Amino acid sequence: MMGNYFGDGYGFMGGFGFFFMILFWGLVIWAIIALVQSVSKNNNQNNNQFATGPSGVQSDTAQEILRKRYAKGEITKAEFDQMKKDLTV
């Protein structure tokens, strides 16, 4: 007899079909994980944007914030002097 259409019963591409199927699904799963990590990393960077500047270094020091509050009129001169004294100690 001539045998069946697929040869000796190993299916498409002999025994390599199973290997390529595992490789394919491994790549699909890896791509999904990489995408989720990338989106998660971008969300964390966006959430930290308010606390830090674009370089990751804190953008305002305590004295700069104090000066801005005094300039806006949020605190009085006496409060400004006291807080400035507390910061330098």
Image (spheres, helix red, strand yellow):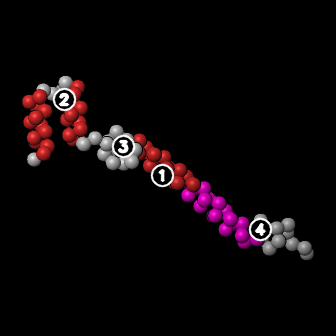
Residue at mark 4: 13
Q: Nearer the viewer, mark 1 or mark 3?
A: 3
Up-down relation of residue 69 to residue 55 (above or below): above
Residue at mark 2: 70
The amino acid type, in three-letter code, at marker 1 is Gln
Residue at mark 1: 37
Q: Nearer the viewer, mark 1 or mark 2?
A: 2
Q: Nearer the viewer, mark 4 or mark 1?
A: 1
- The residue nearer to you, when weighing 69 against 31, is 69
Left or right of 85 on screen, residue 64: right
Q: Nearer the viewer, mark 2 or mark 4?
A: 2
Give the mark nearer the N terminus: 2 vs 4. 4
**Quick one: SS at disc 3?**
loop
Region in magenta: 14-30
Question: Residue at 85% across / 69% down in the picture?
Answer: 4
| Secondary structure mostly taken by the magenta-highlighted segment of the chain | helix
- The residue nearer to you, when weighing 34 against 64, is 64
Up-down relation of residue 10 to residue 78 (above or below): below
Q: How far across and how far down the image is residue 67, in percent?
A: 21, 34
